[in-house]
Amino acid sequence: MTYQGLIHRYGQYLDLPAHTKNISLLEGNTPLIPMPRLSKEFGCELFIKFEGLNPTGSFKDRGMTAAISEAVGRGAQTVICASTGNTAASAAAYAARAGLRSIVLIPEGKVAAGKLAGAIAYGAEVIQVQGSFDDALSLVVEITQKTPIALVNSINPFRIEGQKTSAFEICDVLGSAPDWLCLPVGNAGNITSYWAGFKQYQKGLPRVLGVQAAGAAPLVLGHPVDKPETIATAIRIGRPARGEQALEAAQESNGSIIAVSDGQILSAQRILASEGVWVEPASAAGLAGLIAESAVGKFDAKGKKVVVVCTGHGMKDPSIISESFQSPKVISANYESLIQVVGV
Ligand SMILES: *Cc1c(COP(=O)(O)O)cnc(C)c1O
């Protein structure tokens, strides 16, 4: 039978109310891509779970199919979220699919172009807040407490249910859980979901390495960060809604949560691209963390299965060309100029 989306495939494992009405864009079923060169370098079997290949370009679609399906079944007419960008695009797409009104609050000037464009294209009412993601989330919580508007941020429990499916897929492909799972941590919904998913599926448990950006690392510092700063805008969050659960996942799994610099993130992004996988900066944090831990002897991957979760597609954040890669050369439209640049 052809693939019919996550609720169809894994609904029996998801704690969704009976009123749920399946709204799907055939999200999930993303590839687990073997990375031969990185595997060789680290002496392990390394795979990328490429979540950038979801319908709106990030893993947010897994949770959004569940959250919107529940909201529609309950009779919601309008949904709202705060977003660093990808949640906005995803909420907008699933709301459009369901015929709902969608409102998204984003921190002014801090959302990557590809994400903002998506949210607008799918028809969301995009509101820029003069503040951080955390400020936007507080406003969203307040309005959903005082009005019938449905909240679809990852404090919505159905988002977590939907996002568990990536752990199920990994187990189904590998036959069991990997030895290590490395992933970026922002608001901490995803790490919470993976850990819940692996525990529920009972195909073994990975050690979890959660990775924050150094300028937005409340879980590493042990206190909220008032003015989070990082080039990895998807994890530019100073007060993670599920911080406690993230720390629990790291502790219970005998893993850890660490911070890496923007430079390390951009370097990991280039390494992934050099092996054919282009991800947005935040998505490279998992690999950056693995590299950093290996360098100090804290990541023993020898002979192990390692899954690095790449959460969003590179096309989401095209500004990276000017910031991290070489800009294209310009030549006159003649053969001499071409052969000079090509150099053969
Ligand atoms: C949302 C997001 C994250 C962070 O996930 P959390 O669940 O907030 O920890 C990381 N990378 C990308 C691309 C995202 O969109």
Image: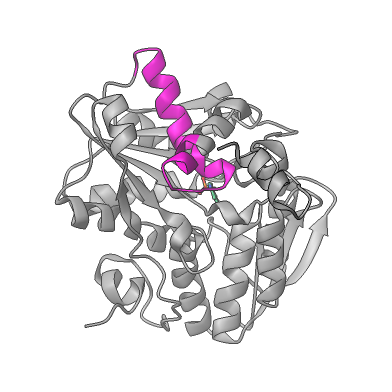
Q: Is 240 positioned to the left or the right of 132 in the image?
A: left
Q: What kind of colouring is applied to the model shown?
A: one colour
Residue 237, horizontal then vertical, whole percent: 64, 41
- From the viewer's perspective, is residue 259 above or below residue 340? above
Q: Is 234 positioned to the left or the right of 3 in the image?
A: right
Task: Look at the image and tell me in which quarter the C terminus lies.
Answer: top right
- Residue extending farthest to the front is 336
- Is residue 315 in view from this perspective? yes
- From the viewer's perspective, is residue 19 above or below residue 286? below
- The residue at 57%/47% (across/down) is 280
Question: Foreground residue, 333 or 33?
Answer: 333
Residue 290, horizontal then vertical, whole percent: 40, 28
- The residue at 33%/60% (across/down) is 165
Task: Look at the image and tell me in which quarter the N terminus lies.
Answer: bottom left
**Region in magenta:** 271-298
Residue 145, horizontal then vertical, whole percent: 67, 65
- From the viewer's perspective, is residue 56 above or below residue 201? below
- The residue at 45%/81% (across/down) is 23
- Magenta span includes 295: yes
- Residue extending farthest to the right is 130
- Is residue 147 in view from this perspective? no
Residue 178, horizontal then vertical, whole percent: 23, 41
- From the viewer's perspective, is residue 259 above or below residue 117? above
SS assignment for the magenta stretch, majority: helix
- Magenta span includes 58: no
Q: Is 208 positioned to the left or the right of 214 in the image?
A: left
Question: Foreground residue, 81 or 109?
Answer: 109
- The residue at 72%/57% (across/down) is 113
Q: Is 69 positioned to the left or the right of 139 in the image?
A: left
